[in-house]
Each structure stands twice: as structure tokens, then as C-alpha cells.
Image: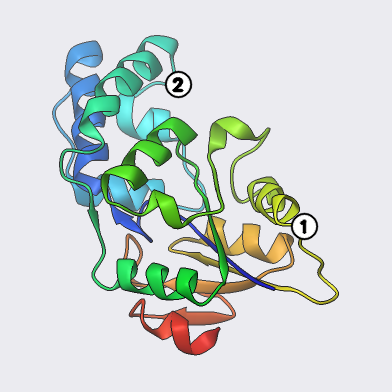
Amino acid sequence: MVVVIFDMDGTLIDSQNDITASINHVRMKNHGLAPLSSDFVVEAINRDQRNLAKLFYNTEHYQDPDRILFEAHYHKQCTESAIVYDGVKEVVEALYEAGIKIGVATNAPSPFAVRMLEHVGLAKYFEKIVGADMVALPKPDPEMLQIILEHLNFDSSKDQAFMVGDNSKDIEAGFRAGAKTVFATWGFSPEGHGDYVIADPMELLSLI
């Protein structure tokens, strides 16, 4: 058995405009702060070391009013402009039709992930969609991937797993879960490292 686990934001779906819109809504409503650019938001999210509460809301820690307002706004916003990256749907369909098991491990809460993947027509292809609300620790902790592999009765002695993502947290989670790692440069991060680095989703088919 071959298993391919994808990150969502920046790998399957370009969601940067919607994420930025909801962050800016919280900044304006709760803090009276000027809007941030989507380029800044994406760069901040993908930093190895960062305090997003400080970067986005100028607070030392996430505050409940900010979290609640963000989630309420993003519930509607998350499907406003989210699109699948070119070539991704074709690759996901090809993997599915070839009998390869595929899943999603995302640091987004699972209700948003399912909503977004259903909106763009991809949810039906995935065996399991695991979000940050379903684990004790988000990526780079490997628990999300382990849940997917356990769900599929993965046997490392005879099966093979791949983790496809666009940032170092995806790659570290994949490594810690014993998967081959594939860094995707078409998404939020144009440069990165992994067992493989690919610039086009179609390249994934030749690896598997």
C-alpha cells in the first residue's frame, strides 16, 4: 500500500486571501489596527519560529475574543476565494483512481478543512482529513499523520508513505512519522527542503 498525505493551505488550496481577510477583520474590529498584506500573512505563517498573536494582533498570546471573532468570520470567508492550485485536482484524481490512499493533515481546524475541501470538490477523494483540533499538538508534531496511517492500518514493513507540504513543519512532521517528504514550491513557500522538491503537482505522479 502507498499512502500520500497532503497539507491543505498552500499545498492543495490557495487560501491566502481568505485567511488574510479574516485576520484583518479581527485586527480592525478588536484592535483598531491597519490591514496586513497577504504576502506578510503567508510569510509569517510559514516562519519556523514566530509568535502569530504578536505579528497579527500585537498581543503576546492569542486572546479568546480574537479567536472567537476569527473563527466566526472565517467560517463564511474560507470559501469566498479559495481555489485549487493548477494541476492539483488532476493529481488527486489520478492517485485516487490508481488505488493510492490519500489523506489530509492540516494545522487548520478540521471543520474549516472539510468545508473548504468540499467547496473545491476534493473532500470525496480523501480517506481521512485531520485538523489541529483533533490532536494534542499541531505539525511539526507527527500525530496527525499517525492518525491517518493508523486509520489505514499502515504497516511500515511493507507499505510506503509520502508527506506533501509547503513548509518546514510539514516536512518535519513527515520525517518524524517515517514518511518520505515532498516539498511543494508552487504554494506559500517558493523554497524548501525534503526528500524531494517539486515545482509542479504533476511531478508527484512520477515519484509514486
Residues 88 and 44: in front is 88
Question: Could you tell me residue 58's position as x and y percent?
Answer: 34, 24
Q: Secondary structure at mark 1?
A: loop
The amino acid beneath tag 2 is: Tyr
Q: Left or right of 110: which side holds 25?
A: left
Residues 96 and 33: in front is 96
Which residue is found at the position 32% from the left and 72% from the top? 90
Q: Tell me, what colour scheme is on the image?
A: rainbow
Inter-mark Cα distance, 2 to 1: 37 Å
Residues 206 and 192: in front is 206
Disc 1 residue crowd, few under 14, some 14–19, many 20+, Cα 10 Å? few
Q: Which residue does the numbered mark 1 point to in the structure image?
A: 153
Which of the two marks, 2 or 1, is nearer to us in this view? 1
Question: Could you tell me residue 113's position as x and y percent?
Answer: 41, 40
The amino acid beneath tag 1 is: Asn
Q: Do the residues under discs 2 and 1 have CB atoms within 8 angstroms?
A: no
Res 5 quadrant in image: bottom right
Q: Secondary structure at mark 2?
A: loop
Q: Earlier in the sequence, mark 2 or mark 1?
A: 2
Q: Look at the image and tell me in which quarter the N terminus lies.
A: bottom right
Visible residue check, residue 186: no
Which residue is found at the position 41% from the left and 76% from the top? 94
Disc 2 residue crowd, few under 14, some 14–19, many 20+, Cα 10 Å? some
Count the marks: how many? 2
Instruction: State the mark number for residue 95.
Output: none
173 w.r.t. 81: above or below: below
Q: Look at the image and tell me in which quarter the C terminus lies.
A: bottom right
Residues 135 and 39: in front is 135
Question: Could you tell me residue 24's position as x and y percent?
Answer: 20, 29
Which residue is found at the position 25% from the left and 12% from the top? 30
Q: Left or right of 142: which side holds 84?
A: left
Q: Which residue does the numbered mark 2 point to in the structure image?
A: 62
